[in-house]
Image (tube, grey):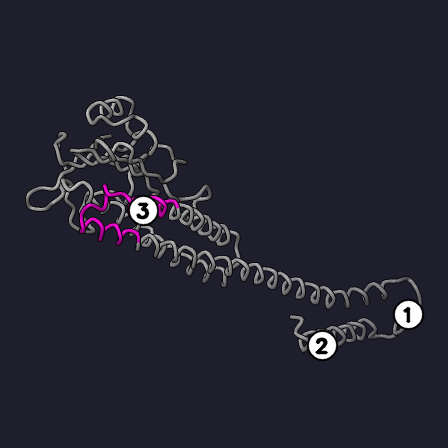
């Protein structure tokens, strides 16, 4: 799918029907015919279009066509997306998006629609000018870093909810959901470090720093990315500590249950022992008494109560 967007004279971002100079070409999961069209129309190598469609593609930057005779540049960054794991629990993953800059347009390529680009289409975050290519590329990267921070806040909120649920009920579902959060942080940590390497390289490229406003915007992007890295590291340490705590809580709860069951079993065994002894076909105390059964039951009850009180005082229950 190929869509075209362009900033109008009134500053509004709007979708247009056909290709125009200064527009934003938004590409989602293109078919072979669309890839051929883009490659021929914009003089972009097919590899630059295909690479962002690989979910395993890592963040990188291609500037070899910029240094001498500008044709195009390619930036691939990992972008956060909200998803579900195989068991249906909330999980955050990352997927690559490619941002290609030519003399006339900016092209974004992704395997599927992502909230970051949707927000830019709806102009929810800030003013965008598709004709100012470098600035628009940096604004996309800023939006990506912003979404990492936004999803990190969602992760910590979800983690607090899971913590409350685990304190009340130690079910496997809560633990599986907590594992999904741990995986999300691992994905974020890897992606943010890869994006950092790309941003550091962009900071050294004159192509992205030839104007003061672009330098300032790129520094803002780098700062946002560093904040996301710091938050991810902090939350990873918190989750690691919580995992150890939950393991201790689970073991402690199991010990309490086993202690209760053991004490209860001992108490129940006392009447069983007495009944077993008096069930023998031999001469036993009180066997000739008229109220033998009642006396034996009363004695058994007294022993059971005394044992229960002793266990209670020793906090076996």
- Residue identifier under label 2: 310
Residue 175 placement, left or right of 136: right
Quadrant containing the N terminus is top left
Point out residue 132 in the picture as x, y percentages from the top left corner. Answer: 15, 42
Mark 2, Cα crowd under 10 Å, few <14 / some 14-19 / many 20+, is: few
Give me the disc on residue 199: 3
**Magenta span:** 194-222
Image depth: mark 3 or mark 2 in front:
3
User: Residue 113: x, y in percent?
Assistant: 28, 38
**Residue sitting at x 32%, y 27%:** 47
Point out residue 35 in the picture as x, y percentages from the top left corner: 27, 25
Q: Reading the chain from its start, which is encountered first: label 3 or label 1?
A: 3
Q: Residue farthest to the front?
A: 68
Say if the magenta span includes residue 198. yes
State the residue lying farthest toward the right: 283
> Regarding mark 1 in the picture, which secondary structure is present there?
loop
Q: Earlier in the sequence, mark 3 or mark 2?
A: 3
Answer whether labels 3 and 2 touch (C-beta < 8 Å).
no
Find numbered disc 3 in the image and state the secondary structure of the residue it sits on: helix
What secondary structure is marked by label 2? helix
Give 42 or 161, whichever is nearer the viewer.
Answer: 42
* Distance Cα–Cα, label 3 vs label 2: 69 Å
> Which is more N-terminal, label 2 or label 1?
1
Residue highlighted by disc 1: 284
- Judge from the rendering whether residue 294 lies leftward or rightward of residue 317; answer left or right: right
User: Along the horizontal axis of the image, is 313 left or right of 214?
Assistant: right
For the point 85% across and 65% down, the residue is 277
The C terminus, quarter of image: bottom right
Which mark, residue 196? none
């Amino acid at each position: 799918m190929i869509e075209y967007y362009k900033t109008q004279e009134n500053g509004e971002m709007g979708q247009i029907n056909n290709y125009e100079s200064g527009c934003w070409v938004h590409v989602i999961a293109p078919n072979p015919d669309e890839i051929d069209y883009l490659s021929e129309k914009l003089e972009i190598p097919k590899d630059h279009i295909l690479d962002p469609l690989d979910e395993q593609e890592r963040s990188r930057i291609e500037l070899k066509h910029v240094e001498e005779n500008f044709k195009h540049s390619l930036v691939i960054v990992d972008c956060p997306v909200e998803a579900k794991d195989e068991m249906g629990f909330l999980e955050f993953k990352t997927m690559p998006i490619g941002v290609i800059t030519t003399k006339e347009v900016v092209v974004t390529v992704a395997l599927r629609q992502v909230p970051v680009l949707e927000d830019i289409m709806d102009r929810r975050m800030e003013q965008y000018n598709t004709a100012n290519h470098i600035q628009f590329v940096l604004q996309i990267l800023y939006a990506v870093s912003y979404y990492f921070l936004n999803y990190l806040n969602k992760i910590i909120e979800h983690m607090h909810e899971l913590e409350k649920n685990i304190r009340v009920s130690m079910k496997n579902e809560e633990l599986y959901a907590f594992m999904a959060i741990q995986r999300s942080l691992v994905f974020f940590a890897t992606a943010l470090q890869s994006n950092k390497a790309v941003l550091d390289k962009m900071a050294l490229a004159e192509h992205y720093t030839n104007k003061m406003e672009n330098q300032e915007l790129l520094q803002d992007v780098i700062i946002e990315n560093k904040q996301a890295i710091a938050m991810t590291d902090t939350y990873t340490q918190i989750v690691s500590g919580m995992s150890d705590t939950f393991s201790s809580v689970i073991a402690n709860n199991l010990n309490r249950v086993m202690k209760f069951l053991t004490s209860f079993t001992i108490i129940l065994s006392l009447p069983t022992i007495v009944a077993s002894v008096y069930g023998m076909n031999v001469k036993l105390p009180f066997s000739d008494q008229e109220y033998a059964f009642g006396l034996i039951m009363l004695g058994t009850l007294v022993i059971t109560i005394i044992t229960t009180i002793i266990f209670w005082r020793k906090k076996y229950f």
